[in-house]
Image: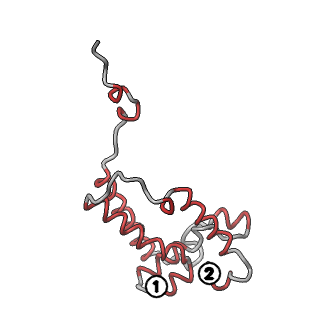
Amino acid sequence: MNRPNARAFHPVLWASRPQPVRDAWLAAALFAWVAVAVRLADPTRPGRFPRCPFHVLTGLDCPGCGSLRALHQLTRADVVAAADYNLLLVLALPAIALAWLRVVTGRTTRRARPAWRGPRVILAGIALWTVVRNLPVLGGVLGA
């Protein structure tokens, strides 16, 4: 009996598959566009960009609060000031750049990721960052 290929009928395989390298270059172009826009329109001046809805509603800083100001400082090569606005962004950008390079150069593999690189661990780290940056003791040190 001739059995059909089970993988050929799997709905995920029929979906259009993203082209990782093309998507990585598009993401880089988008990031460059945002960096130029933030460089030209100083986010430290009021009224340039909308306020963070989370901060407006709760009075607390979200994980992204200060990211535009940090990116503006990074475009001016002031890493210390950028870290004062959003340390998470400053620490994450080299890891994101490394991941981007791996995709563009084709050095990605289908191996299982170590547990510390899983999405749950990253989300837990972001949640922890949100709590720590809103502590009154460290609030002045971790900025935003």
Element type where label 1 sits in the image? helix
- Expressed as whole percent of the image width and height from the top left, the position of residue 108 reads 32, 57
Q: Name the side, left or right, on which 73 lies relative to 20.
A: right
Q: Nearer the viewer, residue 18 or 67?
A: 18
First in sequence: mark 2 vs mark 1:
1
Label 2 close to label 1 by CB (< 8 Å): no
Name the mark on residue 79.
1
- Expressed as whole percent of the image width and height from the top left, the position of residue 45 reads 56, 79
Q: Name the side, left or right, on which 7 lies relative to 69.
A: left
Q: Residue at position x 31%, y 65% from top? A: 101
Q: State the count of labels.
A: 2
- Expressed as whole percent of the image width and height from the top left, the position of residue 60 reads 70, 70
Residue located beneath label 2 in the image = 143
133, above or below 58, in the image: below
> Which residue appears farthest toward the top when viewing the image?
1
Query: Gap in Å between the C-alphas at discs 2 and 1?
Result: 13 Å
Name the mark on residue 122.
none
Looking at the rendered structure, the kind of residue marked 2 is Gly
Q: Residue at position x 47%, y 71% from top? A: 92
Which quarter of the picture shows residue 65? bottom right
Q: Residue at position x 38%, y 62% from top? A: 30
